Amino acid sequence: LIQKLCSVDMDIKVFPINHAEDIVNLVVELCIHGDDKFTAYHQNIPSQSEIIKAVTRLPKVGKVKALALMERFGSIARLSNASVEHVNIMCSLEVDSISCCKLLLHVLRRNNTIYSLYPVVDPDQLLTKYSDSYQQAKYFIFINCGATVDISELLQLSKDITVFVLDSHRPFNLENVYSTNVRLLVSSEEMNDLNIPDAKDIYIVEDEEEEHSETDDGNLPKSPVAKQAKKDSRAQWEIKRNEIMFNYYQFNSYSMSSSMLLYKLICVLSLESNDMLWCAIIGLSSQLVQDHIGIEQYTLWSTDMSQQLRRLRLNQRDQNDLPKDCLSITFQKDLLLSLYRQWNLYDSVCYSRLTAGTLRPWTDHGLKRVREFFARCGLPLAQCKQKFQSMDKKLLDGAQAVMEENFIQQFGLTDIQYGGFVCKALYKHVFAACDIAEAIAGLLYFDKQKSTKARFLEAMDCLNIARTNSVYRGVQFYQAFLKAVNKDVQQILCDGSLMSNCPMLHCRVNQDLSTLHYYKNIYGALFLAQHVQRAFISEKSKHRHKALILILPLKNQRNGILLVGIPPLYSENTSGNPVNLFGEAFSRAAQKMKCYIRQYCFESSIIEIHLDDIENFLTGLYSILET
């Protein structure tokens, strides 16, 4: 981290220190000394007054780095050292949020900080939980919830409340950026990519003398020319502001996972371990599984995590007292197939979203293609249909490379291979990080026998690799979900529920669908939409550049309809992170057609609307997207 900040090669030796603030002092010293060799001792840490004097003497670039780092670590240090304070944590129901929450609790417990944890589903529930708990504490931490809504307006924050927000949803709500009560935590690498507009371009700063004065000079009234000039200037400012706001909010995307960002801060506090790294890896893997980030971005961040893994291994070589059941993590080439280590290769290929959408195994022709695929790979069907762990070891040697080659040559699935993390614990249990991410999703979204709180806690148990029972329960739920999705995709494509003669793909799900309960949450709804889109485009590739809207009946007391908008599968932005334009489009369509929409979760591209308003809303939406 220090080398990146100073952008030079250095020989650094840092001795143990007591507080996170001390790291700021060290970095400031390193900025001062430039590329000189420097040894930092605990007893030689400069005073705060010396730091301030040192920062003022730095060149402009070094000064900005030092001040930014002091502010960043100062906030974390104050929070971690406030052991007498009560902290309220609001955590959304997402896999990355579960991983991030596990890391945060580790830090708070180490500092004996009292905390209360509240799982939240949507902004309405966030408001309810805040209203019930704001008198308990003055510090709040929001995990993957709140960054895209105006927190101060929604919660009516008092001046003594401070909210720290760890959220991977982008873009930030500008009211949060300029709020004195809200602290948005982002990585230093992302700062230049946020494109935050200047305050003067989006907020009016009235001159008090000009505002209260009605005269130019003395008692003479203002001339009509001056009044018109001011009015024209204000109109031009409004036009420019609307353009800036539209460009800023136009697309939604995802940034670095909150668990990965928090792990970097944990490293600064010297609290990192294999277990903590595993939590961050699962958060990152969940973004890949859910198509929140592209394979190129995942590769960059997974390389960073693999470097963290190597660093931990070097530290552990000097320790001879490691427990025999210590979590072992490896970074290796892997296939992006769902749960194949806990399932079998045949079912994994048939039900994984990436392969099922291309092979379409629900048809006779699709089943034939699956069998031909395994035949080309030299893998007997009898072996592929039994548990992966029971397969002939001789067949498994080289099977991954052969399957990858055939997936690419036959079907063009270049994203099937990725750099994955695999853990082994208690001698016999082997899990890929993507498997754990899917198991957590299974418990969090598809176990309807338990309350939200119980599902949240059991999902967090999956991060403790010793709790294998919870992991295997999650695997079973997720397998049942994948089978239901394949069946429903087949029905949607066969009964004409998907229409392609609109500006975008338009899919209405039948309200009599027996498995509709799987899709009343953010994970299931997005998964179904992505699966339908991929399966349809594999047969009719001329629609590959169209976005898709999925319409789901909720069958609730509000007579609501769930609208899910996802971007085109193939677009000019395919090389980067997926960007979604539906969040802003939904908001503008609602304003234009005067329809009430409710944010169903913390994802702005998923909304709830009343059944009677749906046709009027879609008309307005199409007109906006066409322009």
Image (spheres, rainbow, N blue to C red):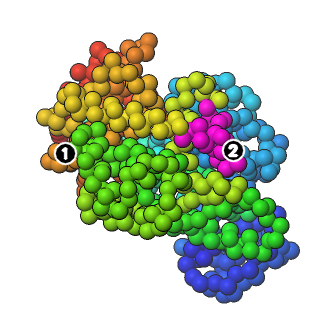
Residue depicted at 44% across the width and 24% down the height? 517
Q: Between residues 298 and 183, which one lies in front from this camera angle?
A: 298
On screen, residue 201 versus residue 333, left or right, reads left
- Classed neighbour count for the residue bearing mark 2: other residues with Cα under 10 Å, few (<14), some (14–19), many (≥20): few
Q: Quadrant of residue 597?
A: top left
User: Farthest residue in the right direction?
Assistant: 43
> Which stretch appears magenta?
455-475
Q: Position of residue 280 (x, y in %)?
A: 59, 55
Q: Residue at x 54, y 73 (%)?
A: 61
User: Which residue type does callout 2 highlight?
Assistant: Arg
Residue at the extreme bottom of the image, as rendered = 36
Residue type at mark 1 is: Glu
Residue 409 in percent (x, y) is at 26, 64
Front-most of residues 46 and 404: 404
186, above or below 513, in the image: below
Asked whether 119 or 585 is in front, the reply is 119
Q: Could you tell me residue 475's position as x and y percent?
A: 54, 41
Quarter holding the N terminus?
bottom right
The answer to if 464 sits in the magenta stretch is yes
Q: Main secondary structure of the magenta part?
A: helix
* Residue at image coords 27%, 29%: 491
Q: Which mark is residue 539?
A: 1
> Which residue occupies 68% across, 71% down?
313
Q: Is residue 118 magenta?
A: no
- Measuring from the top left, give residue 45's x and y in whole percent: 80, 73
In the image, residue 451 above or below residue 627: above
Badge 2 is on which residue?
467
Q: Secondary structure at mark 1?
A: helix
Mark with earlier residue (1, 2): 2
Q: Quick one: SS at disc 2?
A: loop
Q: Is residue 625 visible?
A: no
Q: Is residue 513 above or below residue 290?
A: above
